[in-house]
């Protein structure tokens, strides 16, 4: 599944990070996750889709909804967001 900008249900800012940024590792890490940044939201949704072999857009929309509506404010890093999604997937 590939989740695209047009699939998102919420409004986002779209501030790109330069492609040669050494902070970009290609996997969720200790970088702070911003739920209002579209590129970060798409990255997390598509990462989770790849990791879990999701085949439908509904799973991506559920991920977006969980992050925007239910993510606790003390869950900040990409890695912790990913772990929270995995742990709480069946609750929402």
Image: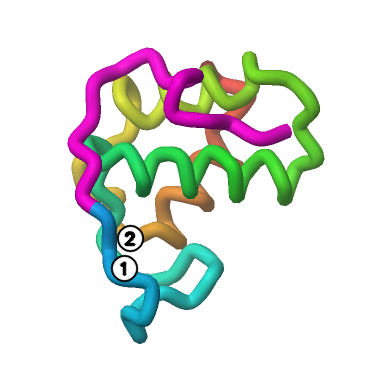
- Please report the residue visible at 52 percent of the width from the left and 19 percent of the height from the top: 61
Magenta span has 5? Answer: yes
In the foreground, 50 or 76: 50
Instruction: Give x and y (percent) for residue 75.
Output: 30, 49
Q: Are there few (<14), some (14-19), or many (20+) residues within 10 Å of tag 2?
A: some
Rendered position, 4 above or below 58: below
**Circle number at residue 31:** 1
Q: Quadrant of residue 90?
A: top right
Coordinates of residue 29 in the picture (x, y in percent): 43, 70
In the figure, is residue 41 to the left or right of 17?
right
Instruction: Assign a secondary structure to mark 1.
Output: loop
Relative to 35, residue 30 above or below: below
| Residue 18 at x, y percent in the picture | 29, 70
Q: Is residue 55 above or below residue 46?
A: above
In the image: residue 46, left or right of residue 72: right
Q: Is mark 2 on a helix, strand or loop?
A: loop
Q: Which of marks 1 and 2 is in front?
A: 1
Q: Identify the residue shown where x is 24% and y is 21%.
A: 11
What span is in magenta?
A: 1-15
């Amino acid at each position: 599944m590939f989740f695209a900008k047009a699939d998102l249900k919420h409004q986002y800012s779209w501030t790109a990070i330069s492609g040669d940024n050494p902070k970009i590792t290609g996997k969720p890490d200790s970088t702070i996750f911003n739920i209002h940044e579209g590129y970060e939201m798409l990255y997390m949704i598509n990462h989770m889709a790849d990791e879990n072999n999701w085949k439908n857009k509904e799973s991506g929309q559920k991920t977006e909804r969980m992050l925007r509506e239910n993510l606790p404010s003390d869950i900040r890093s990409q890695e912790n967001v990913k772990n929270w999604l995995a742990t709480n997937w069946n609750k929402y």
